[in-house]
């Protein structure tokens, strides 16, 4: 099997980890995600992962109910650490050596994020899960994902969600939603397609870092993307 992308940044939706549950982490989903990552690692793909926190706590939602935005975002960043530790546990029970590195220092729980150390982990074949967002409020985990992709020089950002690509409107409840196979960064911004926040798209555009959006619940989808097959939607120049 021919690998097109040697080093990837996998951005996982926190909400997708819920499965059919109303909140939290679905055990079956986390095991499935771990098995998909294990398959990639076995082929020699170097994998960095960023996980959202929508299944536990979403900062913007908290702020909209009167909570201070910085406090809400800090709570959201801590929730990403919970998700990251859960995925680490699932991977290591599957014999995949994994490191969690947090932008918010908490040495008794996981490593602090240091760029050069993260790259060294990747070079040694370890899966690196980047927790704690960027470590700053007002930035989403989408921005954190692109930022880490740039820092580790990943070949591509793969955003794995509950939908199979980017649509002109929410495909849930919209029977006439049209799926895009390919978009430019500027088209995403101009059309207001909310697959990733504007800061993340702008970061990717400045470095010409391709973004692939696909359904994480379909077995083999991420592997197909890494092999260069047309899956989901590609955002590029």
Image (cartoon, grey):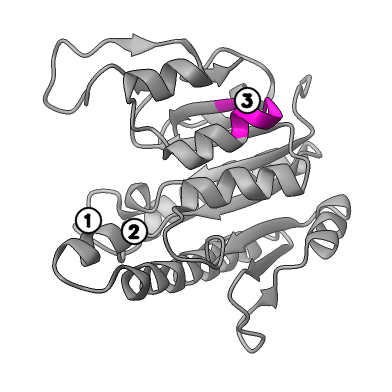
**Residue 224: mark in rendering:** none
Local packing at callout 3 (Cα closer than 10 Å; few below 14, some 14-19, many 20+) is many
- Looking at the picture, how far across and down is residue 98, in whole percent? 70, 63
- Looking at the picture, how far across and down is residue 62, in whole percent? 22, 66
79 horizontally vs 155: left or right: left
Secondary structure state at the residue bearing disc 3: loop
- Looking at the picture, how far across and down is residue 89, in whole percent? 57, 68
Mark found first going from the N terminus, 3 or 2: 2
Residue 112: name its quadrant. bottom right
| Image point (16%, 10%), residue name | 176
Query: Looking at this view, is 55 or 139 the one in front?
Result: 139
Q: Which residue is mark 3?
A: 210
Q: Which residue is mark 2?
A: 26
Q: Which residue is mark 1?
A: 21
- Residue at the farthest bottom position: 108
| Image point (34%, 58%), residue name | 26
The quadrant of the image that shows the N terminus is top right
Mark found first going from the N terminus, 2 or 1: 1
Mark found first going from the N terminus, 1 or 3: 1
- Looking at the picture, how far across and down is residue 45, in whole percent? 76, 39
Residue 173: name its quadrant. top left
Give yes or no for contact between labels 2 and 1 (Cβ–Cβ under 8 Å): yes
| Image point (85%, 60%), residue name | 116
User: Quick check: is 192 in the magenta stretch?
Assistant: no
Query: Looking at this view, is 61 or 56 the one in front?
Result: 61
53 horizontally vs 23: left or right: right
Q: Is residue 220 visible?
A: no
Write down the region rendered in magenta: 204-211
Secondary structure state at the residue bearing disc 2: loop
79 horizontally vs 97: left or right: left
Q: Is residue 60 visible?
A: yes
């Amino acid at each position: 099997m021919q690998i097109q992308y040697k080093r990837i940044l996998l951005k996982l939706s926190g909400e997708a980890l819920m499965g059919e549950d109303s909140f939290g982490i679905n055990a079956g989903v986390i095991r499935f995600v771990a098995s998909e990552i294990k398959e990639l690692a076995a082929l020699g793909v170097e994998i960095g992962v960023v996980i959202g926190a929508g299944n536990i706590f979403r900062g913007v939602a908290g702020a909209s109910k009167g909570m201070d935005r910085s406090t809400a975002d800090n709570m959201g960043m801590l929730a990403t650490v919970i998700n990251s530790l859960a995925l680490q546990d699932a991977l290591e029970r599957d014999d995949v050596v994994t490191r969690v590195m947090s932008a918010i220092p908490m040495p008794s729980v996981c490593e602090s994020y240091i760029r050069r150390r993260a790259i060294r982990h990747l070079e040694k074949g370890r899966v690196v899960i980047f927790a704690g967002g960027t470590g700053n409020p007002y930035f989403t985990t989408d921005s954190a994902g692109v930022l880490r992709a740039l820092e580790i020089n990943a070949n591509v950002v793969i955003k794995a969600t509950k939908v199979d690509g980017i649509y002109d409107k929410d495909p849930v409840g919209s029977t006439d939603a049209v799926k895009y196979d390919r978009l430019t960064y500027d088209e995403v911004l101009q059309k207001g397609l909310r697959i990733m926040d504007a800061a993340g798209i702008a970061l990717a555009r400045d470095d010409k870092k391709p973004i692939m959006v696909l359904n994480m619940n379909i077995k083999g989808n991420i592997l197909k993307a890494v092999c260069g097959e047309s899956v989901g939607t590609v955002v590029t120049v």
